[in-house]
Amino acid sequence: MPVDNEKLPQVAARVQSADWMGLEISGFFCDENGTIKGLNKLGDLNQLIDYVEKHNIDQVWLTLSLKDMDKIETICHQLHSVSVEVLLIPDISSLLLLNHSISQIDGMPVIHMSSSPIKGTNAIIKWLEDKLLSTFILLLISPIMLLIALAVKLSSPGPVFYRQERISWNGTRFQMLKFRSMSVNSDQELIWGKAQNKRLTRVGKFLRKTSLDELPQFINVLKGDMSIVGTS
């Protein structure tokens, strides 16, 4: 769901032409008048939070300029209590100005606005908390993960895990793990289709619906690649 400004048509067109991403755009929010071919305008920016709360939205993409940082911070604050990932499509020249996790989607740099780094004593406390909690949680859910891994292997040929390269806030690259939910082709590459026609396996559909496909990310937390998000 892209939000606002002149970059929106280009971003939307890029997503729509990249079937492999398996994304479906619900529509866009913009304070300005105007239409975008093939997209539904869902309202003004002040209607965004209400829409996200009432619909099953996975991601909100912000195409606002960094000069609109006040708007960006307001939107991120409003969406803080909602289970949605907030991504910013930034100006290339501004990438180093923000201490947020950076990754790419079809070649477009995106900044993960949902989290920011912790420094000093708080960072040490957070590191210990992540190590202890992830170890405890992995021990607790290991039987469930083994059953899911078996189900994934039996559902279709291919690896148990899907690996996605991410870049942390300090520029370190790592492989984020998820249970594979889609079929693979003979070249062992993931096949992506349009959102309404994804090649999800039966097991994959259940894993996506229940978010159980994200359980392997506790391995990333234990390795120090990721952090368990708190309520702060």
Image: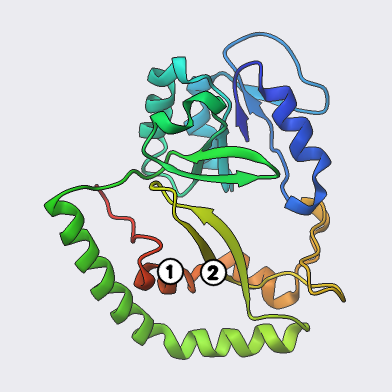
Contact? badges 1 and 2 (CB < 8 Å)? yes
Residue drawn at point x = 78 percent, y = 84 percent: 157
78 sits left or right of 41 in the view = left
Kind of residue at badge 2: Leu
Reply above or below: 152 against 14: below
Please tell me which of labels 1 and 2 falls first in the chain. Answer: 2
User: How many residues crowd around disc 2 within 10 Å: few (fewer than 14), some, or many (20 or more)?
Assistant: many
As drawn, the residue found furthest toward the right would be: 186
Residue drawn at point x = 79 percent, y = 53 percent: 20
Residue drawn at point x = 46 percent, y = 68 percent: 217
Reply above or below: 53 against 202: above
Kind of residue at badge 1: Asn
As drawn, the residue found furthest toward the left would be: 121
* Viewer-closest of 167 and 130: 167
* Viewer-closest of 229 and 96: 96
Residue drawn at point x = 61 percent, y = 71 percent: 207
Reply above or below: 167 against 42: below
Reply above or below: 103 against 154: above
> Label 2 belongs to which residue?
177
> Label 1 belongs to which residue?
220
Element carrying mark 1: helix
Q: Choose top left, top right, bottom left or bottom right for residue 182.
A: bottom right
* Viewer-closest of 96 and 33: 96
Query: Which label belongs to residue 116?
Result: none
